[in-house]
Amino acid sequence: MTTTTTTTTKDGTTTIEAPADLPVIRMSREFRATPAQLVRAHTDADLFVRWVGPDGSEVRIDQWDPRTGGSWRYLNVVKGEEYGFRGCFHTVREDRLVQTFTWEGMPDGVSLETLSFEDLGDGRTRMLAESLVDRFETRDAILASGMEVGLNDGYARLDGLLDDGEV
């Protein structure tokens, strides 16, 4: 059975799904933005640090090379505790990002993430994200980590940046 969590805010609905038969997490979210704005929000380091992560956290970029074949690393600082994340940009296009993602606290738990940006017209875009991991235990640990809170908090901040014309 697929596990589905849906959260609706004033700006959008985030749906997170974990199918029973695959070690994958699928997420969808609509934004009042163009695909180009969303790709920029995910690849421009100055913008990325302003919206990603749970409320009360601070993001510090260590390395950021958002191009096909580039790599990245950042620290998420929460209540004085640092959590390192790193990966490689495999594909950077105007409608699609493919990257690896590793939380350094679980270095064997590498996920392959694909973000697709579907232009819905009228200044709206649906972002579809899929994170594929090697084991169900890894997927379930990610789901239990508070990922949903970080996504929803971060996307609320991204909505604010979009509304203010900063992206």
Image (cartoon, rainbow, N blue to C red):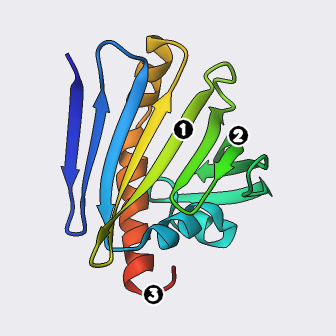
User: Percent from the top left, x then y, of residue 153?
Assistant: 38, 57
Q: Which residue is mark 1?
A: 113
Confirm whether residue 80 shows in the render: no
Residue 88 is labelled as none
For the residues labelled 2 and 3, the Cα–Cα distance comes to 29 Å
Amino acid bearing label 2: Gly
User: Percent from the top left, x then y, of residue 16?
Assistant: 30, 38
For the residues labelled 1 and 3, the Cα–Cα distance comes to 27 Å
User: Percent from the top left, x then y, of residue 63?
Assistant: 80, 54
State which tag comes first along the sequence, 2 or 3.
2
Drawn side of residue 11 relative to residue 87, left or right: left
Q: Which residue is mark 2?
A: 87
Local secondary structure at mark 2 = strand
Count residues near mark 2 (Cα–Cα under 10 Å), then give few for <14, some for 14-19, many for 20+. Answer: many
Which quadrant does the N terminus fall into? top left
Q: Which residue is mark 3?
A: 165
Local secondary structure at mark 1 = strand
Drawn side of residue 130 relative to residue 32, left or right: right
Q: Quarter-wise, where is residue 98 in the image? A: top right
Residue drawn 58% across the image and 29% down it: 111
Residue 94 vs 37, above or below: the answer is above
